[in-house]
Image (tube, rainbow, N blue to C red):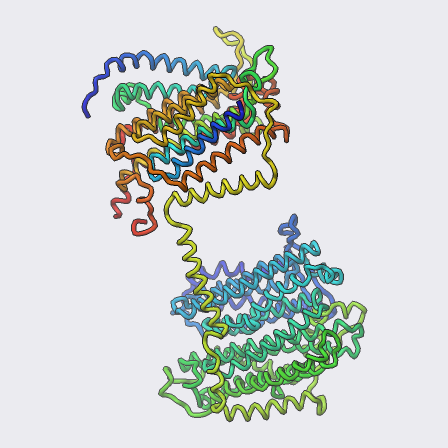
Amino acid sequence: MEILMSIVVGVLFTSAVYLILSKSLLRVIIGTALLSHGAHLLLLTMSGLKTGDAPVLLDGVTSYTDPLPQALVLTAIVISFGVTAFFLVLAYRAYQELGTDNMEEMKGNESND
Amino acid sequence: MSLLHIAIVLPFIAAVFIPFLFKGFRNIHTGWFVLLVPLALFIYFIQYLPVTSGGQTVSKTFEWIPSLGINFNAHVDGLGLLFALLITGIGSLVVLYSIYYLAKEKEALHNFYVYLLMFMGAMLGVVLSDNLIVLYMFWEFTSISSFLLIGYWYDKERSRYGAQKSMLITVFGGLSMLGGIVLLYIMSGTFSIQELISMSGSLMQDPMFIPAMLLILLGAFTKSAQFPFHVWLPDAMEAPTPVSAYLHSATMVKAGIYLVARMSPVFAESGIWLWLVAGFGLFTLFWGSFNAVKQTDLKGILAFSTISQLGLIMSLLGLGAAALHFDQLDENIYMGATIAAVFHLINHATFKGSLFMVAGIVDHETGTRDIRNLGGLVNLMPITFTIALIGTFSMAGLPPFNGFLSKEMFLLATLEILEFNLFSMDTWGILFPVIAWIASVFTFIYSIMLLFKTFLGKLQLDKLPKKPHEAPIGMLISPIVLGALVIVFGFFPNLLSNSMIKPAVEAILPSLVDSGQEVYVNIYFWHGFTPELFMTIGIVLFGTLLYATLGKWQGIYNRIPEQFTINGVYDRGLEKGESGSFKLTEGIMTGYMRTYLLYIFGFFVAILLSTLVVRDAFSIDTSNLAEIRIYEVILAVVMIASAITILFAKSRLTSIIALGAVGYSVALFFVFFRAPDLALTQLVIETVSVALFLLCFYHLPEISRKEERMGFRFGNAVISILVGITITLIAISAYSNSSVFESISQYHIDNVYKLAAGGNMVNVILVDFRGFDTLFEICVLGVAALGIYAMVHFRGVRRQKG
Amino acid sequence: MKKPNDVILQTVTTVISFIIILFSINLFFAGHYTPGGGFIGGLMTAAALVLLLLAYDVKTLNTILPFDYRMMTAAGLLIAVLTGAGALLFNQPFLTHAYDYFNLPLLGETSLHTAVLFDIGVYLVVIGVTMTIIQTIGESE
C-alpha cells in the first residue's frame, strides 16, 4: 500500500509541477492545489499506513495510527485552502488590472514597474 | 566598562550630538565643540606616558560576546599609546585647522564632523584593542569613515570615484585580514594578540602559519597603500585637505604600519615576513618617490610622497625583524631599524601634516594647487613659506631637521642588513641600500620641487583664480605647531627616546626585552664621517643635478602606456566586473516566473537525488507493508486518471471538476487510512474550494472565454517527471527508514487522556499539545482573508497615480 | 444578471443548511473525544452558509445573517490569544490548558475545559475567514 501510495503521490507531483510551469495563471493555481494534495498524502504515507485504529481513544484498543502526521495534515489542509483562495483572488485581480492571465505577458521588469 | 573604554568610544558618543549642535548654534563654528574631544583625550592619554615608559602596560576587559571569545579588551602599551597620542594630538590640530578651512556658512559641517569623530574613535579602537575581532571591527569603521570623508563633496565626480576606489581596495584588504584572523584563531584558539604573542613559537610550525601571515599582510598593505595597492591614495586627495592631512598621511594609512608592528612578535621570525615586508616597503618607497616627481598637483605630490614614506617605514619594520635572530641586545645593530621606524613614524606625522596644511593654505588663498600656475608666493605668504621650508627640508632628509635623523638611521639600517647572513640576505641584500639611495634622490627632487615651484620663481598672478595673501592666523597655528615640532625633534630627539620610542620598540620586539635587558635608544646628530653621511651628501648632489636638468629627462614618465598602469588595470577591472555581473543577472533573472520555478525545481531534484545516491539512502522495506484492497486500487487509478485529465483538459471547467475529483479521492483515502478528522475536513474544504472556483468563474465571464489546450513543453515535462520520481523515491525511503529514530507520537498517544483529558488525539494535539501551531495557523488564515479583502476593496490607488 | 430558476435548490437549501449547521455544532463539541473540533465544525458551518449563498445571493444572505465576518475573525483570534494568555495569570507558560469536572444541572457530571475556549476561537476564525473570502469575491462585481 505504501509503495502504491508513493507512486500515486509521484504522479500527483508530476502533474502539479507541469501545471505550475505552464503559462496560464489559472493552471498555476490548480497546480498548487494539486501539489498540496500530493504533499498531504506524502506526509501520511511516510509515517506508515493503517498501523492501527483511528486515533480516538477507545476501550480495548491498544494500537492506533500515528496521530501526529494527521494533525500536521489537518493544519496543512486548512492553510492550503487559504492559500488557494488568496491565489485565486490575486489572479482575478491581476487579470482585471493587466487584462491577461498569461504569465509570459506579465513579465514586469520593464516599463510598467 | 572602564574609563579607558569610555575614552575610546567618546568620539562616537560625541558624534551623536554634533548634528544638534550644528542646528542649535548656527553662528558658532561646530568645530569649536568638536575640538574639545581630541584635546580632552590627548590630555587623558598623556597620563599613560609614565606608565608605559616604565615598561608597564594597562589592560582593561569589557565582556562583549564572551561565548565566542570576543571581548573588548583595551590594552595600552608603548606602541598603542604612541598611536593614540598621534591620533588625538594631530586630531586636535586638524580640527583647529578645519575650523578656518571649512566655512560654516557653506559646508555641511554636521556631516563632516560626525565622520571625523567616527574615524577618530575607530582609529583609537584599532590601536588600543587587544582582541583581533574588535580590532577588525574598528578597522572597517576607519575604512567606512574614510570613504565618507573622501566623498564629502559628493557632487564632484572625482570625489565619488576616489571614495569608491579607496573603499573597494581597503575593504578587500580588510576582508582578507579577517580571513587571516580566523586562521590564527583556528591555530591558536584565541583572538587575543597578547596570548598569540606568547605562543608564537608553536604557531610557526603550523601549516596555516604562512597563509595567515599573507592574509594579514594583505590587509596591512592595502590600508597603508603599499605597491600595488597604493593607487587609492592619490585619488583619496579629493577629500578636504584637513582630512588628507589627518587620515591620509598621519593616522589611517599608518594603521597598516601599526598592524605590521603589532603582529611582528607573532610572525617576524619567519624569513618570508622579513622579505615581504622589507621588499614591498622598499619598492613602494622607490615607486612613490619616482612617481611623485611627475605630479603637478600639490596634493598629488604629497600623496605619492606619503606612499613612499609609508614604504620606508614598512621596510624598516621588515629589516628590524632581523634583530630577532640574535639573542644579545647589546651590539644588536638590527634593532636600529625598528627604532628608526618608530622615530620616522613620528617625524613623518609632523612634517607631512604641516605640508598638507600648507598645501591647503595655498589652495585656499590662491584657488589652485597646480604647481605650473604657482610660483613666487614667498613675498606674499612669508609664514607659510617658512613652514613649507621646514617641512620639505625635513622630508628631503636635510639637517638640522628631524627627517635628517631618521633618514640617516634608515640608510644605516639598509647598510647593516648586508652583514645579515640568513635568508640569502648576504647576496640579495645589496639591493636594499641601492634602491634606498635612488629613492632618496627622487625624494630630494620632489621635496625641492614642491618648495621652489610654489614659493620661488615668477609670480603668475593672471593664472591664479584668487588674489593671494597670507592666511589668517587661526589657519596657521596648526602648521606652525607641527613645524616647531619638526625643529624641536630635530635638535632634541632624545625628548622622545625614553618616553615614546623605547616603549614602542619594546612592544614591537618583546622577546628581546623578556630577558631583563633594556632597549637603549640614543639618537644624535654627529656620527663622524660614516657611509650614511656620504650617502646623504651624494643624494643632495645628485638630486640638485637632476632637479636642474628636470626638463631633459622628464619624458620618461610618458613611456608607460596607460593600459599597463595599475590604475588602468583597476579601472578596466571595475568596468568589466560591472558589465559582467550585469550580464549575469540579466541572464539569470529573466522576469519570467517559469524560469525561477525551473531553477527551484531543478535544484530540488538535483540536490535530493544526488543526496539519495551519495548517501546511499534509498531503501525499500517490504516487510511491514499495509495490505491493499481492491477498492483502494480502483481509487488510486481514479485519482491518477483525474490528475492526468487536468493536464489534457481543454475547458477550465473540466480541469476544476477533475481537481475536485482528486480532492474527494484524497478524502476517501483519509477514510481508508483511519483518519476521520482529515476525511471530514477534506470533504468540506473540497466542497468550499470548488464553490470558490465556480464563484470566481461566475463572476468572471471574460476569464473563461479564451480557452485553449495547454501546449506541450518537453523541458517542463522532463522537470516534472523528475520531481515526481524524486518524491516517490523519497517517500519509499522515508517510510522504509522510519526506524532510524524514535517517533514522538507515542508520547501524544500515551498522554492524551492523562494530561489533556481528551479522547480525540488529533484534536488534542491541535488545540493543546501543539496549540501554538494552531494559533499561528488561524493568524495566517486571518491574514489571507484580510489580503483578499484588501485586494478587492482597496483598488484604484495605482490608477489614480498612473 | 438574469434570475435563474432554482426553486428546488432554494427550498431544499433552507432545510438542509440548518441541519448542517446543527450537525456542525455537534461536531464542534464532540471534537474533544470523537472526530470533530473547531476546524471541522467551522468549515461545516461555513459550508452551510456557502450553500445558502449559492442558492440565494449575497444580499439575501446579508439580510438573513447580518454578521460582519471580518469582526468574527478578529473576535476568534482574540479569544484564542486570550485563552492562551490566561495561563500566564496562573504563572503557567502561554497556552497551558486546564480542565476539571463539574456537576452541572441538567447535564450531570461534565468536564469543562479551557481548550474548548481556544477551539471556539478557531471555530470563529474559520467561519469568519471562509465567509470573508466568499463574500468578497461575491461582492466584487
The foreground one among B14 and B345 is: B345
Residue B56 occupies quadrant: bottom right
The answer to whether residue B632 is seen in the rendering is: yes
B101 or B400: nearer the viewer: B400
Residue B473: in sight, yes or no?
Answer: no
Q: Nearer the viewer, residue C108 or B193?
A: B193
* Horizontal arrangement in the rendering, residue B57 relative to residue A5 (left or right): right
Residue B679 image position (x, y, % from top left)? 45, 20
Q: In the image, residue B607 lies at what x, y percent?
A: 53, 42
Direction left: furthest residue? C2
Compared across the picture, whether B305 is left or right of B649 comes to right
On screen, residue B85 above or below B664: below
**Vertical position of residue B382 compared to residue B125: above or below:** below
Identify the residue shown where x is 34% and y is 13%: C18
- State which quarter of the image contains the C terminus of chain C: top left
Is residue A58 toward the left or the right of residue B272 in the image? left
State which quarter of the image contains the N terminus of chain C: top left
Give the answer, above or below, for where C103 lies relative to C123. above
Task: Give x and y (percent) for residue B256.
Answer: 60, 68
Residue A89 x/y as whole percent = 33, 34
The quadrant where residue B127 appears: bottom right
